[in-house]
Protein backbone atom coordinates (compact mmCIF):
# COMPACT_ATOMS: atom_id res chain seq x y z
CA UNK A 1 0.00 0.00 0.00
CA UNK A 2 1.29 3.44 -0.88
CA UNK A 3 2.57 5.68 1.90
CA UNK A 4 1.72 9.30 2.42
CA UNK A 5 -2.04 8.74 2.77
CA UNK A 6 -4.03 11.01 5.09
CA UNK A 7 -4.71 9.75 8.59
CA UNK A 8 -7.05 6.75 8.49
CA UNK A 9 -10.32 6.50 10.36
CA UNK A 10 -10.92 3.24 12.27
CA UNK A 11 -14.29 1.53 12.32
CA UNK A 12 -15.77 0.62 15.69
CA UNK A 13 -15.21 -3.06 16.48
CA UNK A 14 -18.93 -3.83 16.54
CA UNK A 15 -21.36 -1.60 14.72
CA UNK A 16 -24.36 -1.28 12.46
CA UNK A 17 -23.48 0.36 9.17
CA UNK A 18 -26.11 1.86 6.90
CA UNK A 19 -25.05 0.62 3.46
CA UNK A 20 -27.06 2.00 0.53
CA UNK A 21 -30.24 1.83 2.57
CA UNK A 22 -29.74 -1.66 4.03
CA UNK A 23 -28.38 -2.07 7.55
CA UNK A 24 -25.80 -4.83 7.75
CA UNK A 25 -23.86 -6.01 10.81
CA UNK A 26 -20.13 -5.80 10.72
CA UNK A 27 -17.40 -7.11 12.99
CA UNK A 28 -14.30 -5.26 11.99
CA UNK A 29 -12.04 -5.60 15.02
CA UNK A 30 -8.40 -5.98 14.00
CA UNK A 31 -9.22 -5.02 10.40
CA UNK A 32 -7.26 -2.57 8.30
CA UNK A 33 -8.45 1.03 8.69
CA UNK A 34 -10.93 2.60 6.34
CA UNK A 35 -9.14 5.49 4.70
CA UNK A 36 -10.73 8.86 5.17
CA UNK A 37 -9.61 9.86 1.70
CA UNK A 38 -9.81 8.09 -1.64
CA UNK A 39 -7.29 9.27 -4.19
CA UNK A 40 -8.98 8.18 -7.41
CA UNK A 41 -12.67 7.34 -7.35
CA UNK A 42 -13.97 5.35 -10.29
CA UNK A 43 -16.24 7.94 -11.89
CA UNK A 44 -17.71 7.63 -15.39
CA UNK A 45 -18.59 10.47 -17.74
CA UNK A 46 -22.14 10.56 -16.34
CA UNK A 47 -20.94 11.25 -12.80
CA UNK A 48 -21.66 7.78 -11.42
CA UNK A 49 -19.22 6.73 -8.68
CA UNK A 50 -18.54 2.98 -8.70
CA UNK A 51 -18.20 1.34 -5.30
CA UNK A 52 -19.80 -2.10 -5.76
CA UNK A 53 -17.53 -4.83 -7.17
CA UNK A 54 -18.88 -8.20 -8.34
CA UNK A 55 -16.20 -10.90 -8.57
CA UNK A 56 -16.90 -14.18 -10.36
CA UNK A 57 -14.67 -16.90 -8.97
CA UNK A 58 -15.64 -19.62 -11.47
CA UNK A 59 -17.72 -20.14 -14.59
CA UNK A 60 -18.67 -23.66 -13.48
CA UNK A 61 -22.00 -24.56 -11.92
CA UNK A 62 -23.58 -27.69 -10.47
CA UNK A 63 -27.04 -26.64 -11.74
CA UNK A 64 -28.21 -26.19 -15.32
CA UNK A 65 -30.80 -23.44 -14.94
CA UNK A 66 -32.52 -23.18 -18.29
CA UNK A 67 -32.36 -19.37 -18.42
CA UNK A 68 -28.65 -19.36 -17.63
CA UNK A 69 -26.93 -22.14 -19.60
CA UNK A 70 -27.77 -24.98 -22.00
CA UNK A 71 -28.59 -28.43 -20.60
CA UNK A 72 -25.29 -29.84 -21.82
CA UNK A 73 -23.41 -27.08 -20.02
CA UNK A 74 -20.76 -24.84 -21.50
CA UNK A 75 -17.09 -25.31 -22.26
CA UNK A 76 -15.47 -24.62 -18.88
CA UNK A 77 -12.44 -22.41 -18.57
CA UNK A 78 -9.15 -24.25 -18.05
CA UNK A 79 -7.91 -23.82 -14.49
CA UNK A 80 -4.89 -21.82 -15.59
CA UNK A 81 -7.16 -19.19 -17.14
CA UNK A 82 -8.90 -18.49 -13.82
CA UNK A 83 -7.59 -15.71 -11.66
CA UNK A 84 -5.76 -17.04 -8.62
CA UNK A 85 -6.89 -16.05 -5.14
CA UNK A 86 -3.79 -13.86 -4.88
CA UNK A 87 -4.67 -12.07 -8.12
CA UNK A 88 -8.27 -11.56 -7.00
CA UNK A 89 -7.13 -10.22 -3.63
CA UNK A 90 -4.67 -7.84 -5.27
CA UNK A 91 -7.31 -6.32 -7.54
CA UNK A 92 -9.87 -6.14 -4.74
CA UNK A 93 -7.45 -4.48 -2.33
CA UNK A 94 -6.42 -1.94 -4.94
CA UNK A 95 -10.04 -1.08 -5.68
CA UNK A 96 -10.85 -0.68 -2.00
CA UNK A 97 -7.76 1.21 -0.84
CA UNK A 98 -7.19 3.36 -3.90
CA UNK A 99 -10.61 3.67 -5.53
CA UNK A 100 -13.10 3.56 -2.65
CA UNK A 101 -14.94 0.31 -3.39
CA UNK A 102 -16.91 -0.59 -0.26
CA UNK A 103 -18.92 -3.65 -1.33
CA UNK A 104 -17.73 -6.96 -2.80
CA UNK A 105 -20.03 -9.75 -3.94
CA UNK A 106 -18.66 -13.16 -4.92
CA UNK A 107 -20.49 -14.88 -7.77
CA UNK A 108 -20.13 -17.57 -10.40
CA UNK A 109 -21.13 -19.79 -12.09
CA UNK A 110 -21.67 -21.27 -8.68
CA UNK A 111 -18.98 -19.87 -6.35
CA UNK A 112 -19.08 -22.77 -3.90
CA UNK A 113 -17.71 -25.17 -6.51
CA UNK A 114 -14.40 -23.26 -6.40
CA UNK A 115 -12.10 -25.25 -4.15
CA UNK A 116 -11.07 -23.63 -0.84
CA UNK A 117 -13.48 -20.74 -1.25
CA UNK A 118 -13.34 -19.93 2.46
CA UNK A 119 -9.63 -19.15 2.01
CA UNK A 120 -10.45 -16.42 -0.49
CA UNK A 121 -13.21 -15.10 1.75
CA UNK A 122 -10.72 -14.88 4.60
CA UNK A 123 -8.33 -12.90 2.39
CA UNK A 124 -11.05 -10.47 1.32
CA UNK A 125 -12.46 -10.19 4.83
CA UNK A 126 -9.33 -8.26 5.80
CA UNK A 127 -10.67 -5.40 3.68
CA UNK A 128 -13.19 -2.92 5.16
CA UNK A 129 -16.05 -3.88 2.84
CA UNK A 130 -19.51 -5.38 2.89
CA UNK A 131 -18.57 -8.92 1.81
CA UNK A 132 -21.37 -11.04 0.40
CA UNK A 133 -22.03 -13.88 -2.03
CA UNK A 134 -24.69 -15.16 -4.43
CA UNK A 135 -25.15 -18.95 -4.52
CA UNK A 136 -27.66 -21.62 -5.46
CA UNK A 137 -27.47 -22.76 -1.84
CA UNK A 138 -27.24 -26.48 -2.50
CA UNK A 139 -24.02 -26.98 -0.48
CA UNK A 140 -24.70 -24.52 2.34
CA UNK A 141 -25.63 -27.14 4.93
CA UNK A 142 -22.00 -28.26 4.92
CA UNK A 143 -20.32 -24.93 4.12
CA UNK A 144 -22.29 -22.01 5.61
CA UNK A 145 -20.57 -22.17 8.99
CA UNK A 146 -17.10 -22.17 7.46
CA UNK A 147 -17.97 -19.31 5.12
CA UNK A 148 -19.34 -17.20 7.96
CA UNK A 149 -16.34 -17.99 10.15
CA UNK A 150 -14.03 -16.90 7.32
CA UNK A 151 -15.70 -13.50 7.18
CA UNK A 152 -18.70 -13.69 4.85
CA UNK A 153 -21.34 -11.27 6.15
CA UNK A 154 -24.49 -11.94 4.18
CA UNK A 155 -25.75 -14.06 1.32
CA UNK A 156 -28.21 -14.26 -1.57
CA UNK A 157 -29.62 -17.67 -2.47
CA UNK A 158 -31.29 -18.42 -5.80
CA UNK A 159 -34.69 -20.15 -5.63
CA UNK A 160 -37.04 -19.91 -8.60
CA UNK A 161 -39.73 -22.34 -7.48
CA UNK A 162 -41.10 -23.97 -4.34
CA UNK A 163 -42.50 -26.90 -6.33
CA UNK A 164 -40.21 -29.89 -6.55
CA UNK A 165 -41.20 -30.87 -10.09
CA UNK A 166 -40.84 -27.34 -11.43
CA UNK A 167 -37.57 -26.78 -9.58
CA UNK A 168 -36.16 -29.92 -11.19
CA UNK A 169 -37.40 -28.81 -14.60
CA UNK A 170 -35.78 -25.37 -14.24
CA UNK A 171 -32.44 -26.50 -12.81
CA UNK A 172 -32.25 -30.05 -14.21
CA UNK A 173 -31.44 -31.10 -10.65
CA UNK A 174 -33.73 -32.68 -8.04
CA UNK A 175 -32.34 -30.58 -5.20
CA UNK A 176 -35.14 -28.36 -3.90
CA UNK A 177 -34.92 -29.90 -0.43
CA UNK A 178 -31.18 -29.24 -0.22
CA UNK A 179 -31.62 -25.60 -1.26
CA UNK A 180 -34.36 -25.04 1.33
CA UNK A 181 -32.12 -26.66 3.93
CA UNK A 182 -29.28 -24.43 2.75
CA UNK A 183 -31.40 -21.35 3.46
CA UNK A 184 -31.92 -22.61 7.01
CA UNK A 185 -28.20 -23.33 7.33
CA UNK A 186 -27.33 -19.77 6.27
CA UNK A 187 -29.67 -18.37 8.91
CA UNK A 188 -28.24 -20.70 11.56
CA UNK A 189 -24.69 -19.64 10.63
CA UNK A 190 -25.58 -16.03 11.44
CA UNK A 191 -25.38 -14.66 7.90
CA UNK A 192 -27.55 -11.55 7.95
CA UNK A 193 -29.44 -10.70 5.95
CA UNK A 194 -30.24 -13.83 3.98
CA UNK A 195 -31.95 -12.91 0.71
CA UNK A 196 -33.63 -15.18 -1.81
CA UNK A 197 -33.32 -14.36 -5.54
CA UNK A 198 -36.20 -15.32 -7.83
CA UNK A 199 -36.00 -14.87 -11.59
CA UNK A 200 -39.64 -14.41 -12.65
CA UNK A 201 -40.61 -15.70 -16.09
CA UNK A 202 -44.09 -15.44 -17.54
CA UNK A 203 -45.74 -18.80 -18.04
CA UNK A 204 -42.96 -20.52 -16.14
CA UNK A 205 -43.09 -19.53 -12.46
CA UNK A 206 -45.06 -16.28 -12.26
CA UNK A 207 -47.94 -18.17 -10.65
CA UNK A 208 -45.71 -18.60 -7.56
CA UNK A 209 -45.03 -14.91 -6.90
CA UNK A 210 -47.34 -14.71 -3.87
CA UNK A 211 -46.25 -18.13 -2.59
CA UNK A 212 -42.61 -17.05 -2.71
CA UNK A 213 -43.43 -13.76 -0.99
CA UNK A 214 -45.21 -15.73 1.74
CA UNK A 215 -42.17 -18.02 2.03
CA UNK A 216 -39.97 -15.00 2.68
CA UNK A 217 -42.32 -13.67 5.33
CA UNK A 218 -42.51 -17.04 7.07
CA UNK A 219 -38.77 -17.77 6.97
CA UNK A 220 -37.62 -14.27 7.84
CA UNK A 221 -35.70 -13.81 4.58
CA UNK A 222 -36.03 -11.02 2.03
CA UNK A 223 -37.15 -12.23 -1.38
CA UNK A 224 -35.87 -10.33 -4.41
CA UNK A 225 -37.91 -10.83 -7.56
CA UNK A 226 -35.72 -10.33 -10.64
CA UNK A 227 -37.09 -9.46 -14.04
CA UNK A 228 -36.01 -11.94 -16.71
CA UNK A 229 -33.08 -10.42 -18.63
CA UNK A 230 -31.57 -11.19 -22.06
CA UNK A 231 -28.57 -13.09 -20.71
CA UNK A 232 -29.77 -16.65 -21.36
CA UNK A 233 -27.28 -18.93 -23.09
CA UNK A 234 -29.75 -20.21 -25.70
CA UNK A 235 -30.81 -16.65 -26.64
CA UNK A 236 -34.55 -17.30 -26.52
CA UNK A 237 -35.35 -14.27 -24.32
CA UNK A 238 -38.19 -12.01 -25.36
CA UNK A 239 -39.96 -9.11 -23.67
CA UNK A 240 -43.15 -11.17 -23.67
CA UNK A 241 -41.54 -13.42 -21.04
CA UNK A 242 -40.84 -10.49 -18.71
CA UNK A 243 -43.11 -10.02 -15.70
CA UNK A 244 -42.62 -6.37 -14.81
CA UNK A 245 -42.18 -4.71 -11.45
CA UNK A 246 -45.65 -3.16 -11.38
CA UNK A 247 -47.32 -6.51 -11.95
CA UNK A 248 -45.19 -8.27 -9.34
CA UNK A 249 -45.90 -5.60 -6.71
CA UNK A 250 -49.61 -5.56 -7.53
CA UNK A 251 -49.94 -9.31 -7.09
CA UNK A 252 -48.15 -9.29 -3.76
CA UNK A 253 -50.05 -6.22 -2.61
CA UNK A 254 -53.35 -8.00 -3.13
CA UNK A 255 -52.29 -10.58 -0.58
CA UNK A 256 -50.24 -8.47 1.81
CA UNK A 257 -50.65 -4.69 2.29
CA UNK A 258 -47.35 -2.93 1.64
CA UNK A 259 -45.64 0.38 1.12
CA UNK A 260 -42.55 1.41 -0.87
CA UNK A 261 -39.17 1.97 0.77
CA UNK A 262 -37.08 4.94 -0.37
CA UNK A 263 -35.00 4.08 -3.41
CA UNK A 264 -31.19 3.83 -3.06
CA UNK A 265 -28.41 2.92 -5.50
CA UNK A 266 -28.97 -0.78 -4.73
CA UNK A 267 -30.44 -2.70 -7.68
CA UNK A 268 -33.69 -3.66 -5.95
CA UNK A 269 -36.69 -1.40 -5.45
CA UNK A 270 -37.87 -2.44 -1.99
CA UNK A 271 -41.30 -2.66 -0.37
CA UNK A 272 -42.22 -3.06 3.29
CA UNK A 273 -45.11 -5.17 4.58
CA UNK A 274 -47.40 -3.01 6.70
CA UNK A 275 -47.84 -5.75 9.29
CA UNK A 276 -44.11 -5.68 10.06
CA UNK A 277 -43.32 -9.04 8.45
CA UNK A 278 -40.26 -7.76 6.64
CA UNK A 279 -39.61 -6.54 3.10
CA UNK A 280 -39.21 -7.77 -0.44
CA UNK A 281 -37.49 -6.25 -3.44
CA UNK A 282 -37.85 -6.17 -7.21
CA UNK A 283 -34.84 -5.87 -9.52
CA UNK A 284 -36.55 -4.22 -12.48
CA UNK A 285 -33.68 -4.13 -14.96
CA UNK A 286 -36.04 -4.25 -17.94
CA UNK A 287 -39.14 -2.20 -17.07
CA UNK A 288 -37.58 0.31 -14.66
CA UNK A 289 -33.97 0.63 -15.68
CA UNK A 290 -31.81 2.00 -12.85
CA UNK A 291 -28.75 2.61 -15.00
CA UNK A 292 -28.63 6.27 -13.95
CA UNK A 293 -27.68 5.27 -10.39
CA UNK A 294 -25.69 2.12 -11.16
CA UNK A 295 -22.47 1.85 -9.15
CA UNK A 296 -21.54 -1.74 -10.06
CA UNK A 297 -18.46 -3.07 -11.84
CA UNK A 298 -17.52 -6.68 -12.54
CA UNK A 299 -14.53 -8.98 -12.70
CA UNK A 300 -15.04 -12.26 -14.53
CA UNK A 301 -13.49 -15.54 -13.46
CA UNK A 302 -10.93 -15.28 -16.26
CA UNK A 303 -9.89 -11.77 -15.28
CA UNK A 304 -11.87 -9.60 -17.66
CA UNK A 305 -13.05 -6.30 -16.23
CA UNK A 306 -16.58 -5.26 -17.24
CA UNK A 307 -18.07 -1.84 -16.57
CA UNK A 308 -21.66 -3.10 -17.03
CA UNK A 309 -23.51 -6.41 -16.87
CA UNK A 310 -24.56 -5.81 -20.50
CA UNK A 311 -21.22 -4.49 -21.73
CA UNK A 312 -20.05 -5.71 -25.12
CA UNK A 313 -16.45 -4.74 -24.40
CA UNK A 314 -14.16 -6.25 -21.80
CA UNK A 315 -10.78 -5.09 -20.46
CA UNK A 316 -8.10 -7.73 -19.92
CA UNK A 317 -6.91 -7.42 -16.34
CA UNK A 318 -5.46 -10.93 -16.24
CA UNK A 319 -2.95 -10.21 -18.99
CA UNK A 320 -1.94 -7.02 -17.21
CA UNK A 321 -1.53 -8.75 -13.85
CA UNK A 322 0.55 -11.54 -15.32
CA UNK A 323 2.81 -9.22 -17.26
CA UNK A 324 4.30 -7.66 -14.13
CA UNK A 325 2.20 -4.51 -14.26
CA UNK A 326 2.35 -2.02 -11.40
CA UNK A 327 -0.64 -0.96 -9.33
CA UNK A 328 -0.62 2.33 -11.25
CA UNK A 329 -0.95 0.38 -14.49
CA UNK A 330 -3.91 -1.57 -13.11
CA UNK A 331 -5.55 1.61 -11.84
CA UNK A 332 -5.14 3.24 -15.24
CA UNK A 333 -6.96 0.33 -16.89
CA UNK A 334 -9.78 0.44 -14.33
CA UNK A 335 -10.26 4.17 -14.69
CA UNK A 336 -10.26 3.99 -18.46
CA UNK A 337 -12.76 1.15 -18.47
CA UNK A 338 -15.14 2.96 -16.14
CA UNK A 339 -14.84 6.14 -18.19
CA UNK A 340 -16.01 4.13 -21.22
CA UNK A 341 -19.24 3.00 -19.53
CA UNK A 342 -22.43 3.68 -21.47
CA UNK A 343 -25.35 5.68 -20.12
CA UNK A 344 -27.51 2.54 -20.02
CA UNK A 345 -28.02 -0.96 -21.36
CA UNK A 346 -30.80 -0.04 -23.81
CA UNK A 347 -32.62 -3.38 -23.58
CA UNK A 348 -35.81 -1.93 -25.02
CA UNK A 349 -34.13 -0.04 -27.85
CA UNK A 350 -34.03 -1.34 -31.42
CA UNK A 351 -30.22 -1.17 -31.48
CA UNK A 352 -29.72 -3.20 -28.27
CA UNK A 353 -26.73 -5.53 -28.54
CA UNK A 354 -26.63 -8.61 -26.34
CA UNK A 355 -23.39 -9.47 -24.55
CA UNK A 356 -21.58 -12.39 -26.15
CA UNK A 357 -21.45 -14.18 -22.79
CA UNK A 358 -24.27 -15.67 -20.76
CA UNK A 359 -24.93 -14.80 -17.12
CA UNK A 360 -23.00 -17.82 -15.82
CA UNK A 361 -19.92 -16.73 -17.76
CA UNK A 362 -20.13 -13.09 -16.67
CA UNK A 363 -21.06 -13.56 -13.04
CA UNK A 364 -24.35 -12.55 -11.44
Image (cartoon, helix red, strand yellow):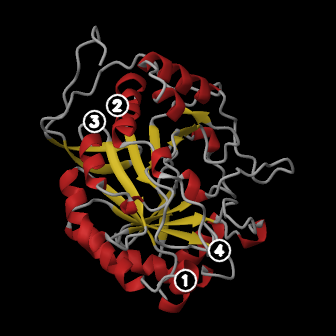
SS type, badge 1: helix
Q: Which residue is mark 1?
A: 208
* Residue extending farthest bottom: 165
Q: Is residue 254 visible?
A: no
Please tell me which of labels 4 and 1 falls first in the chain: 4
The answer to whether the residues at label 3 and label 2 have Cβ atoms under 8 Å apart is yes
25 relative to 200 in the view: left or right: left
Query: Considering depth in this image, is 363 or 46 the residue closer to the camera?
Result: 363
Please tell me which of labels 3 and 1 falls first in the chain: 3
Per the model, the C-alpha gap separating discs 3 and 1 is: 39 Å
SS type, badge 4: loop
Tell me what residue is drawn at x 57 percent, y 69 percent: 199
Q: Is residue 37 visible?
A: yes
Q: Which label number is shown at residue 136?
A: none
Please tell me which of labels 3 and 2 falls first in the chain: 2
Please tell me which of labels 4 and 2 falls first in the chain: 2
55 relative to 11 in the view: left or right: right
Q: Which label number is shown at residue 201?
A: 4
Q: Position of residue 357 (x, y in %)?
A: 66, 53
Please tell me which of labels 2 and 1 falls first in the chain: 2
Per the model, the C-alpha gap separating discs 4 and 3 is: 37 Å
Q: Which residue is mark 3?
A: 127
Per the model, the C-alpha gap separating discs 4 and 1 is: 10 Å
143 relative to 267 in the view: left or right: left
> In the image, which is nearer the foreground, mark 4 or mark 3?
3
Please determine whether, in this image, residue 282 is positioned above or below residue 184.
above
Amino acid sequence: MATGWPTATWWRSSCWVEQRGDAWPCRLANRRPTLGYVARQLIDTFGRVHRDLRISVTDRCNFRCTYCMPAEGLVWLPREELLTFEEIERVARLMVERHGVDSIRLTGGEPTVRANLSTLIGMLADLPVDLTMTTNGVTLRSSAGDLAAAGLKRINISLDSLRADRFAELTLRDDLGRVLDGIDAALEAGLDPVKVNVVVMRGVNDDEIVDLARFGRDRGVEVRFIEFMPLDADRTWSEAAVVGCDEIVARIGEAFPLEPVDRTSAPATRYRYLDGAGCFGVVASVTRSFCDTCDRIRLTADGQFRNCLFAVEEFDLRALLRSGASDDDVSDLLEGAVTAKWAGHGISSVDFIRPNRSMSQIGG
